[in-house]
Image: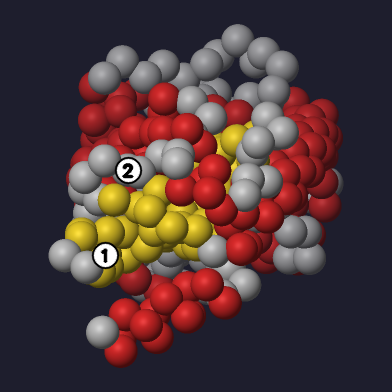
Amino acid sequence: VNGEHRYKSFFKMNGATMLLIDSTTGSIVDSNEAACRFYQYDLDTLKGMSMKDLAANNESLIEIRKLAAGRSPSVVSRQKKSSGKIVDVEIFASPFSMEDMDLINLIVVDITEALAAKNKLSEALGRLHTALEGAVNFVSKVVKARDPCTAGHQKNVSRLATAIAERLGLDDNRSRTVRIAGLLHDVDKVSIPVEILSKPVRLTDLEWSLIKRHPIVGYEILYDVKLGGPIAEIVKNHHDRINGSGYPEGLIGSELSLESRIVAVADVVEAMVSHRPYRASRGLGEAVQEIKGNSGVLYDEEVVDACLAVIDSGFKIDRSDSRL
């Protein structure tokens, strides 16, 4: 009895919006002053209502019933005040027994402003992502203009790498990071003389050493650009190999991120099926043999398996050189 008395005192004096409802019928058994002010009803009126009367729609009522059934500790609902104004609330529930009645104590929190702020933030992030996508595509086009002999390479690597990432079950954010890294993995080519990029014969050792440094240049270009993921690191490591034989850092196995290993395989496949000034296309069959034969040696086995599955599913490398 003393416990009930203390609880009633706590309930009545609490500044939070609180309701006591019958767990079976949903009828409002009691309300504190904060709830009366929130819903804009006097105490007697509220005690003659049920949660159904406060629900703004049937969906809200279904959510509230989850509380009564004990299937959820809280629900987000739309509630209506006496004025007809609709508000978004989160309702927290806990069972309570009093005078042989099975009741549920509800605490109602107005989240209307929080949801509005969240929606505005989502809209702002959407605009930011659109701007970033525009910047990424612009840079990709600049690289393509500098190296027309490999036009479309970045786009194709991005498409294939993204398909591999999705096949591996990476979430949307990581798949997006892979896609952007694929589009930018050769961004450093803006620093390499065109005559080297388009040279129709074998490169000299000095020229090759310049080419091998290109991932570092790409990393330096992208390091301070915040694109929502470790894109600079992926660009830097897409020529590293899991046995340490790659460049520029000679990283081994797990030292390479999964995203870097994905872009590496996509880059190799796309490069081998493409024509270059110094050689003809080697064809998809030879590219498949390359990654198969070096699976677990140069290339991550899981990534290779996913790439082969993507190719077997009918993935086509775009040769139209369409706009990015």
Q: Is residue 123 visible?
A: yes
Camera-side residue: 227 or 124?
124
Residue indicated by mark 1: 95
Q: Quadrant of the C terminus?
A: top right
**Res 26 label:** 2
Which residue is found at the position 68% from the left and 30% from the top? 84
Q: Residue 218 location, x and y as percent?
A: 71, 57
Residue at x 32%, y 65% (from the top left corner): 94
Question: From the viewer's perspective, is 88 left or right of 191?
Answer: left
- Within-10-Å neighbours for mark 2: few <14, some 14–19, many 20+: many
For the question of whether residue 295 can be seen, the reply is no
Q: Mark 2: which secondary structure? A: loop
The quadrant holding residue 242 is bottom left
The spot of residue 308 in percent (x, y) is 25, 33
Viewer-closest of 97 and 118:
97
Which numbered mark, 2 or 1, is in the foreground of this view?
2
Furthest-front residue in this view: 44
